[in-house]
């Protein structure tokens, strides 16, 4: 059994069906996939998008379930990506980086091979102030820092992620500028397969994860899976994990 742990936000959500299928096709054994993601997901805050709330990545039940599960025979693999939403929630870079480091340390406690994706600096820093305001209003309505402040905070978080990765002996993968369009934080649909193939192939000992676009019907079955805990319309809803299991023994655990 190959355990894979994904920590992220909206890009993981948008690509999740192809990620799940690609890992199962590319890895030589059944996959035990643990994933904490979601639109607007925070690493340390309980975040809301429309009528849905999710716990912060560092506070979700994923960590308890990992601690309770028997360690697999192969070394677990993890990817930390989509770091940056918290800046738009008003979280300072040093606080956000401390949350990410907490996740890294917990993963290292399970002898996990970790890849850290840096921020898409090339796409974000080429934005104009007007485009930044439009993007913020669309995806993160409300407060948030002005553009000059955000530029500095983004650079600080990117540098901090690289320092964390080096100190904790993690692999680093940097998003390519051509993956993004007018929207500077979400990988364009036509580039998602290539982007995820590159990011998921950075783990040591992995020859290459082959990601392919999936038919809409196959994507929907993964997008409809329920996380362990979420609030909908003010009511907490829970789902038993794993939320999906295949005949080959592969499982999906969502948080």
Image: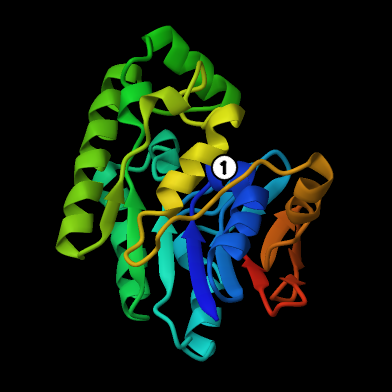
What residue lies at 26% left-to-right and 61% top-to-bottom? 170
Residue sitting at the far bottom: 70
**Does residue 140 appear in the picture of this structure?**
no
Q: Position of residue 40 (x, y in %)?
A: 55, 42
Toward which corner of the image does residue 175 lie, by quadrant? Answer: top left
Task: Tell me if residue 95 can be seen.
Answer: yes
Query: In percent of the image, x 40 and y 55: which residue is there?
Result: 80
Query: How many neighbours does mark 1 have within 10 angstroms: few (below 14), some (14-19), or many (20 or more)?
Result: some
Residue annotated with mark 1: 10
Residue name at image x 32 percent, y 24 percent:
122
Q: Give the x, y percent position of residue 219.
A: 75, 47
Q: Quadrant of the N terminus?
A: bottom right
Q: Is residue 1 left or right of residue 157?
A: right
Indicate left or right for 149 with 141 as reference: left
Q: With 73 as the anchor, is 24 left or right in this view?
A: right
Taking the image as shown, residue 109 lies to the left or right of residue 48, namely left
The quarter in which the C terminus is drawn is: bottom right
Spot occupied by residue 27 in the image (x, y as percentages of width and height): 53, 67
Instruction: Reply above or below: 255 against 48.
Output: below
- Residues 244 and 202: in front is 202
Q: What colouring style does the render use?
A: rainbow
Can you tell which quarter of the image residue 224 is in?
bottom right
Residue 109 higher or lower than 232, as above or below: below
Label 1 element class: helix
Q: Nearer the viewer, residue 81 or 73?
A: 73
Task: Give the image location of residue 105, x and y in percent.
Answer: 30, 71
Q: Is residue 198 above or below residue 234?
A: above
Residue positioned 49% across, 55% down in the render? 209
């Amino acid at each position: 059994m190959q355990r894979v742990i994904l920590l992220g936000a909206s890009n993981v959500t948008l690509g999740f069906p192809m990620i799940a299928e690609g890992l199962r096709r590319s890895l030589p054994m059944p996959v035990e996939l643990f994933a904490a993601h979601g639109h607007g997901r925070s690493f340390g805050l309980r975040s809301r998008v429309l009528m849905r709330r999710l716990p912060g990545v560092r506070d979700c039940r994923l960590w308890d379930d990992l601690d309770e599960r028997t360690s697999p025979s192969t070394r677990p693999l993890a990817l930390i990506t989509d770091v940056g939403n918290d800046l738009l929630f008003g979280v300072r870079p040093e606080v956000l980086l401390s949350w990410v480091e907490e996740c890294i340390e917990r993963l290292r406690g399970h002898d996990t091979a970790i890849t850290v994706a840096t921020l898409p600096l090339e796409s974000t820093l080429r934005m104009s102030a007007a485009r930044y305001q439009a993007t913020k209003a669309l995806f993160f309505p409300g407060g948030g820092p002005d553009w000059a402040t955000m530029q500095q905070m983004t650079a600080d978080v990117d540098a901090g992620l690289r320092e964390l990765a080096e100190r904790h002996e993690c692999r680093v993968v940097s998003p390519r500028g051509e993956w993004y369009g007018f929207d500077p934080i979400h990988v364009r649909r036509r580039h998602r397969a290539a982007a995820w193939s590159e990011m998921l192939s950075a783990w040591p000992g992995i020859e290459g994860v082959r990601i392919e676009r999936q038919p809409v019907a196959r994507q929907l079955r993964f997008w409809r899976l329920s996380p362990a805990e979420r609030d909908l319309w003010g009511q907490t809803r829970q789902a038993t994990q794993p939320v999906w299991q295949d005949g080959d023994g592969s499982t999906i655990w969502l948080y």
